[in-house]
Amino acid sequence: MDSCFDIRVFRGPDIGPWLADVARLRVAVFRDWPYLYEGDFDYERDYLAAYAASPRSLFVLALDDGRVVGASTGLPLLDDTEAFRVPFLATDIAPREVFYFGESVLLPAYRGRGIGHAFFDRREAHARALGGFRWTAFCAVDRDPQDPRRPVGHRGNEVFWHKRGYRRRDGMTMQLAWDEIDRGEIPHALTFWLRPLEATP
């Protein structure tokens, strides 16, 4: 990873001072494919407040000269809203044993420099240090590969996630609504990806 970037980890209430920066970053990055999110700063800041309220949560931030250019989040699944736990209820995976990764967001100019791996490394290490978790998990929005809004030459993150040991769990899908650009609020399907959490890296 480029040594000019500063990767820092903040936990629990220490996240508070960074909520606005991460909210702004999420609004900017999620406008692009595949989220196509219209963006609502106040909603994002309130959503992220759940992380600050969880004593076992974390933010992993990529800073360039003190400016937040990337962010990745995580918290115990039981500390997130019920909607994120529902897909687990029909499985043999107990929500209490899952550490949930929120989305990672990174400005385009900083991609391809190893920051994504740093985000996963820090979050997985945090989950191991907490103890009691057997799985790490995240969910990704399902988009039709033939959607005409898909950018030409777009490369998804699936290969990267596979290399990190994560596997898509067909059927473990939740519904989440957000405002799409030019379409208003509509529901979206998001499917979970999971990886067993080893005791040691």
Image (cartoon, grey):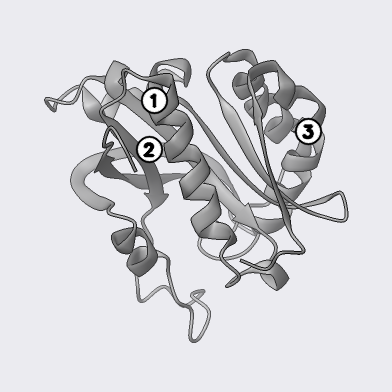
Q: Quadrant of residue 76?
A: top left
Foreground mark, 1 or 3, reads 3
Farthest front residue in view = 200
How far is the residue under mark 3 from the one under mark 2?
Answer: 28 Å
Q: Earlier in the sequence, mark 1 or mark 3?
A: 3
- Mark 2–mark 1 contact, CB under 8 Å? yes
Please tell me the numbered disc located at residue 175. 2
169 vs 77, left or right, is: left
Residue at x-position 47% and y-position 47%: 121
Residue contact between numbered discs 1 and 3, judged by CB atoms under 8 Å: no
Q: Nearer the viewer, mark 3 or mark 2?
A: 3
Residue 134 point in image, percent of width and height: 25, 28
Of callouts 3 and 2, which one flags the residue occurring earlier in the amino acid sequence?
Answer: 3
Q: Height in image: 64 above or below 131?
A: below
- Residue 186 showing in the rendered view: no
Q: Which residue is found at the position 58% from the left and 13% from the top?
A: 55
The answer to whether 121 is drawn above or below residue 51 in the figure is below
Type of amino acid at the residue the image marks with label 1: Ala
Amino acid marked by disc 2: Gln
- Which residue, given by chain and number where applicable, does mark 1 sit on? 83
Quarter of the image holding residue 139? top left
Residue beneath disc 3? 18
Q: CA distance from mark 2 to mark 1?
A: 8 Å
Image side of residue 73 versus residue 92, left or right:
right
Q: Residue furthest bottom?
A: 153
Q: Secondary structure at mark 3?
A: helix
Asked whether disc 3 touches disc 2, contact meaning CB atoms under 8 Å apart, the reply is no
Mark 3 is on which residue type?
A: Trp
2 or 1: mark nearer the eye? 1
Please state, as top left, top right, bottom left or bottom right, where the C terminus lies in the image.
Answer: top left
Q: Residue at x 61, y 70 (%)?
A: 113
